[in-house]
Image: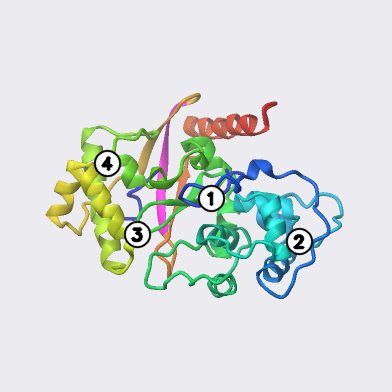
Protein backbone atom coordinates (compact mmCIF):
# COMPACT_ATOMS: atom_id res chain seq x y z
CA UNK A 1 0.00 0.00 0.00
CA UNK A 2 3.04 2.17 0.42
CA UNK A 3 2.95 3.38 -3.15
CA UNK A 4 -0.71 3.39 -3.98
CA UNK A 5 -1.61 7.03 -3.86
CA UNK A 6 -0.16 10.12 -5.36
CA UNK A 7 -2.06 13.08 -5.36
CA UNK A 8 0.61 26.53 0.73
CA UNK A 9 1.72 26.03 3.45
CA UNK A 10 3.08 28.67 3.01
CA UNK A 11 0.88 27.16 2.00
CA UNK A 12 -0.30 25.58 5.09
CA UNK A 13 -3.11 23.46 6.18
CA UNK A 14 -6.61 24.54 6.89
CA UNK A 15 -9.63 22.74 8.22
CA UNK A 16 -11.41 20.53 5.74
CA UNK A 17 -14.80 22.20 6.05
CA UNK A 18 -16.10 25.63 5.08
CA UNK A 19 -15.08 28.52 7.31
CA UNK A 20 -17.17 31.29 8.74
CA UNK A 21 -16.37 34.66 7.26
CA UNK A 22 -14.38 35.71 10.34
CA UNK A 23 -11.69 33.09 9.69
CA UNK A 24 -9.65 34.46 6.82
CA UNK A 25 -5.86 34.64 6.83
CA UNK A 26 -6.09 37.48 4.30
CA UNK A 27 -7.24 39.69 7.17
CA UNK A 28 -3.87 39.27 8.87
CA UNK A 29 -1.47 42.20 8.75
CA UNK A 30 2.23 41.79 9.28
CA UNK A 31 2.65 43.87 12.39
CA UNK A 32 2.62 42.79 16.03
CA UNK A 33 -0.65 43.54 17.82
CA UNK A 34 -0.11 44.77 21.36
CA UNK A 35 -2.14 45.20 24.51
CA UNK A 36 -3.27 41.63 25.08
CA UNK A 37 -3.51 40.51 28.68
CA UNK A 38 -4.23 36.78 28.81
CA UNK A 39 -6.10 35.38 31.80
CA UNK A 40 -5.86 31.91 33.28
CA UNK A 41 -8.09 30.20 30.73
CA UNK A 42 -7.82 29.23 27.08
CA UNK A 43 -6.01 32.43 26.10
CA UNK A 44 -3.13 31.85 28.52
CA UNK A 45 -2.43 28.44 26.99
CA UNK A 46 -2.51 29.76 23.42
CA UNK A 47 -0.22 32.61 24.37
CA UNK A 48 2.25 30.41 26.27
CA UNK A 49 2.45 27.86 23.46
CA UNK A 50 2.80 30.64 20.88
CA UNK A 51 5.72 32.13 22.84
CA UNK A 52 7.59 28.82 23.03
CA UNK A 53 7.34 28.08 19.26
CA UNK A 54 10.29 29.53 17.40
CA UNK A 55 9.73 31.05 13.93
CA UNK A 56 12.12 28.61 12.25
CA UNK A 57 10.15 25.67 13.67
CA UNK A 58 7.02 27.00 11.97
CA UNK A 59 8.70 27.70 8.64
CA UNK A 60 9.29 31.45 9.12
CA UNK A 61 12.70 33.15 8.83
CA UNK A 62 14.09 34.30 12.17
CA UNK A 63 14.94 37.73 10.76
CA UNK A 64 15.86 40.68 12.96
CA UNK A 65 15.47 40.73 16.77
CA UNK A 66 11.84 40.53 17.85
CA UNK A 67 9.90 42.36 20.52
CA UNK A 68 8.02 39.17 21.35
CA UNK A 69 9.20 35.66 22.16
CA UNK A 70 8.28 32.93 19.73
CA UNK A 71 5.68 33.54 17.04
CA UNK A 72 3.93 36.84 16.45
CA UNK A 73 0.14 36.71 16.60
CA UNK A 74 0.00 37.55 12.92
CA UNK A 75 2.15 34.52 12.12
CA UNK A 76 0.09 32.13 14.23
CA UNK A 77 -3.13 33.50 12.73
CA UNK A 78 -1.77 32.91 9.22
CA UNK A 79 -0.74 29.33 10.02
CA UNK A 80 -4.07 28.53 11.65
CA UNK A 81 -6.18 30.22 8.96
CA UNK A 82 -7.96 32.59 11.35
CA UNK A 83 -8.00 36.37 11.56
CA UNK A 84 -5.60 38.25 13.83
CA UNK A 85 -8.57 39.96 15.48
CA UNK A 86 -10.13 36.63 16.38
CA UNK A 87 -6.83 35.33 17.79
CA UNK A 88 -6.49 38.47 19.93
CA UNK A 89 -10.00 37.96 21.28
CA UNK A 90 -9.18 34.33 22.09
CA UNK A 91 -6.05 35.35 23.97
CA UNK A 92 -7.94 38.09 25.81
CA UNK A 93 -10.76 35.74 26.76
CA UNK A 94 -13.33 37.77 24.83
CA UNK A 95 -13.98 34.86 22.45
CA UNK A 96 -14.87 31.87 24.60
CA UNK A 97 -16.48 29.28 22.33
CA UNK A 98 -14.05 28.37 19.52
CA UNK A 99 -15.25 25.61 17.22
CA UNK A 100 -13.51 22.26 16.98
CA UNK A 101 -12.28 23.37 13.55
CA UNK A 102 -10.51 26.35 15.09
CA UNK A 103 -9.08 24.24 17.91
CA UNK A 104 -7.78 21.65 15.44
CA UNK A 105 -6.16 24.36 13.30
CA UNK A 106 -4.54 25.99 16.36
CA UNK A 107 -3.28 22.61 17.58
CA UNK A 108 -1.58 21.98 14.25
CA UNK A 109 -0.18 25.49 13.96
CA UNK A 110 1.20 25.41 17.53
CA UNK A 111 2.73 21.93 16.99
CA UNK A 112 0.98 20.56 20.08
CA UNK A 113 1.44 17.01 21.27
CA UNK A 114 -1.67 14.82 21.46
CA UNK A 115 -1.87 15.42 25.22
CA UNK A 116 -1.54 19.20 24.82
CA UNK A 117 -4.17 19.17 22.07
CA UNK A 118 -6.60 17.27 24.30
CA UNK A 119 -6.01 19.76 27.11
CA UNK A 120 -6.63 22.68 24.74
CA UNK A 121 -10.01 21.16 23.80
CA UNK A 122 -10.89 20.59 27.47
CA UNK A 123 -10.01 24.15 28.53
CA UNK A 124 -12.10 25.43 25.61
CA UNK A 125 -15.11 23.42 26.81
CA UNK A 126 -14.99 20.93 23.93
CA UNK A 127 -14.64 17.17 24.07
CA UNK A 128 -11.17 16.10 22.90
CA UNK A 129 -11.09 14.05 19.69
CA UNK A 130 -11.96 10.45 20.43
CA UNK A 131 -9.01 8.10 20.43
CA UNK A 132 -11.15 5.51 18.66
CA UNK A 133 -11.75 7.93 15.79
CA UNK A 134 -9.49 8.60 12.83
CA UNK A 135 -6.39 10.56 13.67
CA UNK A 136 -6.29 14.04 12.16
CA UNK A 137 -3.70 15.59 14.47
CA UNK A 138 -0.31 16.20 12.90
CA UNK A 139 2.38 15.71 15.54
CA UNK A 140 5.25 18.21 15.82
CA UNK A 141 7.73 15.64 14.48
CA UNK A 142 5.63 14.96 11.36
CA UNK A 143 5.10 18.68 10.79
CA UNK A 144 8.87 19.16 10.99
CA UNK A 145 9.32 16.56 8.26
CA UNK A 146 6.88 18.43 6.02
CA UNK A 147 8.63 21.74 6.74
CA UNK A 148 12.19 20.47 6.29
CA UNK A 149 11.59 18.68 2.98
CA UNK A 150 10.96 22.00 1.28
CA UNK A 151 12.43 20.89 -2.05
CA UNK A 152 10.09 17.87 -2.29
CA UNK A 153 6.30 17.87 -2.68
CA UNK A 154 4.99 16.47 0.64
CA UNK A 155 1.46 16.16 2.03
CA UNK A 156 -0.20 14.42 4.97
CA UNK A 157 -3.54 12.60 4.59
CA UNK A 158 -5.83 11.09 7.20
CA UNK A 159 -6.82 7.37 6.96
CA UNK A 160 -9.79 8.28 4.71
CA UNK A 161 -7.47 10.17 2.33
CA UNK A 162 -8.51 13.70 3.21
CA UNK A 163 -5.54 16.03 2.94
CA UNK A 164 -4.58 17.68 6.23
CA UNK A 165 -1.37 19.59 5.61
CA UNK A 166 1.11 20.12 2.79
CA UNK A 167 4.12 22.21 1.84
CA UNK A 168 4.62 24.84 -0.84
CA UNK A 169 6.28 22.37 -3.21
CA UNK A 170 3.16 20.17 -3.06
CA UNK A 171 0.89 23.11 -3.83
CA UNK A 172 3.13 24.11 -6.75
CA UNK A 173 3.05 20.62 -8.25
CA UNK A 174 -0.49 19.41 -7.51
CA UNK A 175 -2.44 22.66 -7.12
CA UNK A 176 -3.11 24.50 -3.88
CA UNK A 177 -5.47 22.47 -1.63
CA UNK A 178 -6.40 25.63 0.28
CA UNK A 179 -8.45 26.64 -2.77
CA UNK A 180 -10.96 23.86 -2.00
CA UNK A 181 -12.75 22.66 1.13
CA UNK A 182 -15.02 19.95 2.45
CA UNK A 183 -15.31 16.79 0.38
CA UNK A 184 -13.14 18.26 -2.39
CA UNK A 185 -10.15 17.76 -0.09
CA UNK A 186 -10.78 14.02 -0.08
CA UNK A 187 -8.90 12.03 -2.70
CA UNK A 188 -11.52 9.27 -2.99
CA UNK A 189 -14.33 11.78 -3.43
CA UNK A 190 -12.43 13.54 -6.21
CA UNK A 191 -11.64 10.20 -7.85
CA UNK A 192 -15.16 8.77 -7.87
CA UNK A 193 -17.04 11.98 -8.64
CA UNK A 194 -14.88 12.83 -11.64
CA UNK A 195 -13.23 15.92 -10.16
CA UNK A 196 -10.12 16.60 -12.18
CA UNK A 197 -6.69 15.90 -10.73
CA UNK A 198 -3.24 16.37 -12.20
CA UNK A 199 -2.32 12.67 -11.98
CA UNK A 200 -2.56 11.13 -15.44
CA UNK A 201 -3.80 7.51 -15.67
CA UNK A 202 -4.78 5.18 -18.48
CA UNK A 203 -7.89 3.01 -18.10
CA UNK A 204 -6.05 0.09 -16.51
CA UNK A 205 -4.25 2.34 -14.04
CA UNK A 206 -7.51 4.09 -13.16
CA UNK A 207 -9.26 0.78 -12.50
CA UNK A 208 -6.42 -0.49 -10.32
CA UNK A 209 -6.30 2.78 -8.40
CA UNK A 210 -10.04 2.68 -7.70
CA UNK A 211 -9.95 -0.93 -6.49
CA UNK A 212 -7.01 -0.20 -4.18
CA UNK A 213 -8.62 2.99 -2.91
CA UNK A 214 -11.88 1.28 -1.95
CA UNK A 215 -10.00 -1.59 -0.34
CA UNK A 216 -7.95 0.87 1.70
CA UNK A 217 -11.06 2.74 2.79
CA UNK A 218 -12.63 -0.54 3.93
CA UNK A 219 -9.58 -1.22 6.09
CA UNK A 220 -9.95 2.24 7.64
CA UNK A 221 -13.62 1.54 8.45
CA UNK A 222 -12.54 -1.72 10.08
CA UNK A 223 -9.86 0.04 12.11
CA UNK A 224 -12.19 2.87 13.23
CA UNK A 225 -15.69 1.33 13.34
CA UNK A 226 -17.09 4.08 15.58
CA UNK A 227 -15.96 7.00 13.42
CA UNK A 228 -19.11 8.66 12.09
CA UNK A 229 -17.10 10.68 9.55
CA UNK A 230 -15.95 7.50 7.84
CA UNK A 231 -19.47 6.10 7.63
CA UNK A 232 -20.79 9.39 6.20
CA UNK A 233 -18.06 9.36 3.57
CA UNK A 234 -18.91 5.80 2.53
CA UNK A 235 -22.65 6.60 2.34
CA UNK A 236 -22.10 9.76 0.31
CA UNK A 237 -19.68 8.04 -2.07
CA UNK A 238 -22.11 5.16 -2.62
CA UNK A 239 -24.87 7.64 -3.48
CA UNK A 240 -22.66 9.75 -5.73
CA UNK A 241 -20.84 6.97 -7.63
CA UNK A 242 -22.26 3.68 -8.96
CA UNK A 243 -18.67 2.55 -9.55
CA UNK A 244 -17.81 3.07 -5.87
CA UNK A 245 -21.03 1.33 -4.78
CA UNK A 246 -20.15 -1.67 -6.96
CA UNK A 247 -16.61 -1.94 -5.60
CA UNK A 248 -17.76 -1.43 -2.02
CA UNK A 249 -20.29 -4.25 -2.39
CA UNK A 250 -17.49 -6.61 -3.45
CA UNK A 251 -15.92 -6.22 0.01
CA UNK A 252 -12.37 -6.60 -1.17
CA UNK A 253 -9.79 -5.96 1.54
CA UNK A 254 -6.61 -6.92 -0.32
CA UNK A 255 -4.81 -5.07 -3.07
CA UNK A 256 -2.77 -6.17 -6.05
CA UNK A 257 -0.15 -3.53 -5.51
CA UNK A 258 0.45 -0.44 -7.58
CA UNK A 259 3.42 1.11 -9.28
CA UNK A 260 5.01 4.02 -7.47
CA UNK A 261 5.56 5.90 -10.73
CA UNK A 262 3.07 8.73 -11.32
CA UNK A 263 2.82 11.15 -14.22
CA UNK A 264 1.68 14.61 -13.20
CA UNK A 265 0.24 16.87 -15.89
CA UNK A 266 1.33 20.34 -14.79
CA UNK A 267 -0.54 23.18 -16.56
CA UNK A 268 2.63 25.24 -17.20
CA UNK A 269 5.43 22.67 -17.23
CA UNK A 270 3.70 19.72 -18.87
CA UNK A 271 4.02 16.02 -17.94
CA UNK A 272 6.40 15.11 -15.09
CA UNK A 273 7.01 11.48 -14.18
CA UNK A 274 7.87 11.06 -10.49
CA UNK A 275 8.17 8.37 -7.86
CA UNK A 276 5.41 8.50 -5.26
CA UNK A 277 5.98 6.93 -1.85
CA UNK A 278 3.40 6.74 0.93
CA UNK A 279 4.61 6.27 4.51
CA UNK A 280 2.27 5.45 7.39
CA UNK A 281 2.84 7.42 10.59
CA UNK A 282 3.17 4.98 13.48
CA UNK A 283 0.34 5.12 15.98
CA UNK A 284 -1.96 7.31 13.91
CA UNK A 285 -2.45 5.83 10.40
CA UNK A 286 -1.73 9.24 8.92
CA UNK A 287 -0.16 8.95 5.46
CA UNK A 288 2.87 10.97 4.47
CA UNK A 289 2.95 11.24 0.66
CA UNK A 290 6.23 12.26 -0.98
CA UNK A 291 7.08 12.81 -4.66
CA UNK A 292 10.69 12.49 -5.83
CA UNK A 293 12.51 12.55 -9.16
CA UNK A 294 15.61 10.71 -10.31
CA UNK A 295 18.56 13.06 -9.70
CA UNK A 296 19.83 15.04 -12.71
CA UNK A 297 16.93 13.84 -14.85
CA UNK A 298 14.68 16.00 -17.06
CA UNK A 299 11.85 15.27 -14.64
CA UNK A 300 13.94 16.62 -11.75
CA UNK A 301 14.45 19.84 -13.75
CA UNK A 302 10.72 20.08 -14.44
CA UNK A 303 9.94 19.52 -10.76
CA UNK A 304 12.25 22.39 -9.80
CA UNK A 305 10.58 24.56 -12.42
CA UNK A 306 7.14 23.99 -10.84
CA UNK A 307 8.53 25.36 -7.57
CA UNK A 308 9.94 28.44 -9.28
CA UNK A 309 6.57 29.07 -10.93
CA UNK A 310 4.79 28.50 -7.62
CA UNK A 311 7.07 30.96 -5.83
CA UNK A 312 6.43 33.59 -8.50
CA UNK A 313 2.69 33.12 -8.08
CA UNK A 314 2.94 33.52 -4.30
CA UNK A 315 5.08 36.67 -4.52
CA UNK A 316 3.49 38.33 -7.59
CA UNK A 317 2.24 41.94 -7.47
CA UNK A 318 -1.35 40.83 -6.76
CA UNK A 319 -0.15 39.17 -3.52
Is mark 3 in CB contact (under 8 Å) with mark 2? no
User: Is 290 located above or below residue 265 in the figure?
Assistant: below
Q: Nearer the viewer, mark 2 or mark 1?
A: 1
Please report the bounds of the magenta region as a residue range. Answer: 270-279
Alpha carbons under labels 1 and 4: distance apart = 23 Å
Is tag 2's residue or tag 1's residue first in the polypeptide sequence? 1
Q: Residue tagged by mark 1?
A: 14
- Pointer 2 local density, CA inside 10 Å: few below 14, some 14–19, many at least 20: many
Which of the pair 44/161 is nearer the observer? 44
The answer to which of marks 3 and 2 sits earlier in the sequence is 2
Q: Tags 4 and 2 in contact by the CB under 8 Å rule?
A: no
With respect to residue 106, does 10 lie above or below? above
Q: For the residue labelled by badge 2, is the local secondary structure a helix, a strand or a loop?
A: loop
- State how many labels appear: 4
4 and 3 marks in contact (CB < 8 Å): no
Q: Is residue 62 magenta?
A: no
Identify the secondary structure beneath mark 1: loop
Per the image, label 4 sits on a secondary structure element best described as helix
Residue identifier under label 3:
229
Is 50 in front, or is 89?
89
Crowding near pointer 1: few (<14 within 10 Å), some, many (20+)? Answer: many
Residue pictured at 49% horizontal, 72% vertical: 128
Label 4 or label 3, whichever lies nearer to me, is 3
Question: Which image quarter is the N terminus in?
Answer: bottom left
Q: Which residue is mark 2?
A: 70
Q: Which residue is mark 4?
A: 192
Q: Is residue 271 magenta?
A: yes
Amino acid sequence: MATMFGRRRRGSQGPDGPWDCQYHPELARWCETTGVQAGDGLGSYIQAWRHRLQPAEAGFPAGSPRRTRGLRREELALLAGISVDYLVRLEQGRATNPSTQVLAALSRALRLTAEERDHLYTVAGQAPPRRSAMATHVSPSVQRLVDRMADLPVAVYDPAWTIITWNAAWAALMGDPSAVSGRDRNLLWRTFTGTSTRVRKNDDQADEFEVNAVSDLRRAVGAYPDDARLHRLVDELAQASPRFAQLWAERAVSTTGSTNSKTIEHPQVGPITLDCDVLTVAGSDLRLVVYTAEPASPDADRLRLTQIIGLQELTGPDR
